[in-house]
Image (spheres, helix red, strand yellow):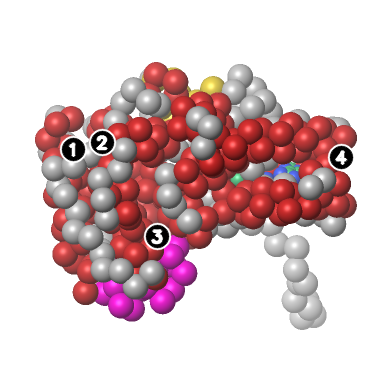
Amino acid sequence: MANGLDDVVAAETVLSDVDGLGGRLTIRGHSLPELAGRWRYPQVVRLLLDGFFDDLPDDAKLAQAIGRARVEVFERLQPMLPALVPLDVYSGMRAGIALLPDGDTLTDALLLIAAPAVLTPALLRGKRGSPAIVPNPQADHAADMLRMLSGTDTSPALATALDTYLVTVCDHGLNASTFATRVVASTQAGLTSAILAGLGALKGPLHGGAPGPVIEMLDAIEADGNAAGWLRAKIARGERIMGFGHRIYRVRDPRADVLKAVVRQLGGAGATGRRLAFAEKVEQTALEVLRQAKPSRSIQTNVEFYTALLLEAAGFPAEAFSNVFAAGRVAGWVAHAREQQTTGRLIRPLSRYVGPVPDLVA
Ligand code: ACO
């Protein structure tokens, strides 16, 4: 039995492939460096959804349809914001998404793809006591998300940085949240039900909940002043260093390098540049500490380490980092859900019973 399903192939997919030894991510025939920073997020949404909806339009029309979906999500969910804002920002987003229709049309899919980008800024503003900002259907998806957060048009460089992030995390093989999504889709439940399963799985700190704690770690190490001592003490307590390690990658996560380059471009001599320089030192120390503490396992930097720096630079508070992860990954979840619904079977594995057995009656 594979505890954690290590090395178990549980689906065939045309969507993405994670090469853990080569450190490569392929998304529908394209390597990550071909896409990140070159394709905009709506184009990658189209790439992922291609073949799963008969009425999928071309790139330009799909970008417009995603813009209209942002407006529709806002109109449907704005009246619910007073009930959602008091929740933590991830739970508020999840609860809002649960109110969307549970169908499997392209319209349903685009509402789900638009929802995290609309709800996250609205919930964060609500927590500050500021009114939510109506989406602009004509705007670029990432730029509009930032505008709905800050209330003003942000720099093209920041919008490009966020767009590159959304593309970088859009899909990643059969990770825990995508598997959870496929399990629900395999029952022929609707897309919203499937995406809610993905959202539940993403929340945990071993998966999409890691980048917030990365910021806490950097702040704590800065205050402590002794990175190696702080990190060794954490491992000695049996705790994990957030932003390091991966089930599949035995080399560096290729997404970490893409995101680090984006943060470097944003950096300069300002706060982001100083944060990056400090984080790079912590990264090197952490890799050395992990090498000494776990010599039998290759533990490398994962996507979450530089996600934290990028999203901090983009103006998101740490409490919303998993929301922004969901804003990118939702496209992959929808595509996997449709692939499972249209080509897969009910997922129903076995368990081995190790509990007490009933007394045999003579
Ligand atoms: N810090 C300290 N020790 C670690 C770490 C880490 N970040 N990662 C793995 N290890 C150690 C474990 O303690 C364990 O040691 P042991 O054998 O002495 O008990 C060994 O490496 C194997 O750990 P597993 O949990 O079996 O390995 P797995 O491949 O399942 O780990 C995981 C993957 C869960 C991501 C792990 O590396 C981790 O907890 N990382 C920190 C959280 C994190 O960054 N999550 C984001 C992952 S990326 C993503 O999901 C988008």
Where is mark 4, residue-wise?
Answer: 293
Spot occupied by residue 318 in the image (x, y as percentages of width and height): 52, 55
Q: Do the residues labelled 1 and 2 touch (CB within 8 Å)?
A: yes
Disc 2 residue type (three-letter) = Pro
Q: Which mark is residue 63?
A: 1
Query: What main secondary structure does the magenta stretch of the protein show?
Result: helix
Q: Nearer the viewer, mark 3 or mark 4?
A: 4
Q: What element carries label 1?
A: helix
Q: Does the residue labelled 4 lie within 8 Å of ligand 1?
A: yes
Q: In this view, does 120 lie to the left or right of 283?
A: left
Residue 81 lies in the magenta-colored region: yes
Vertical position of residue 334 compared to residue 54: above or below: below
* Marker disc for residue 196: 3
Name the amino acid, label 1.
Ala
Q: Residue at x 26, y 65 (%)?
A: 132
The answer to whether residue 193 of the structure is visible from this angle is no
Q: Tell me which amino acid carries mark 4.
A: Ala
Q: What stretch is highlighted in magenta?
A: 80-97
Q: Earlier in the sequence, mark 1 or mark 2?
A: 2
What's the CA distance linking mark 3 and mark 1?
Answer: 24 Å
Is disc 1 surrounded by few (<14), some (14 to 19) or many (20+) residues within 10 Å?
Answer: many
Report how far apart the C-alphas of labels 1 and 2 lie in the structure: 5 Å
Q: How crowded is mark 4: few (under 14 residues within 10 Å), some or many (20 or more)?
A: few
For residue 42, the mark is: 2
User: Between disc 3 and disc 4, whose residue precedes?
Assistant: 3
Mark earlier in primary sequence (3, 1): 1
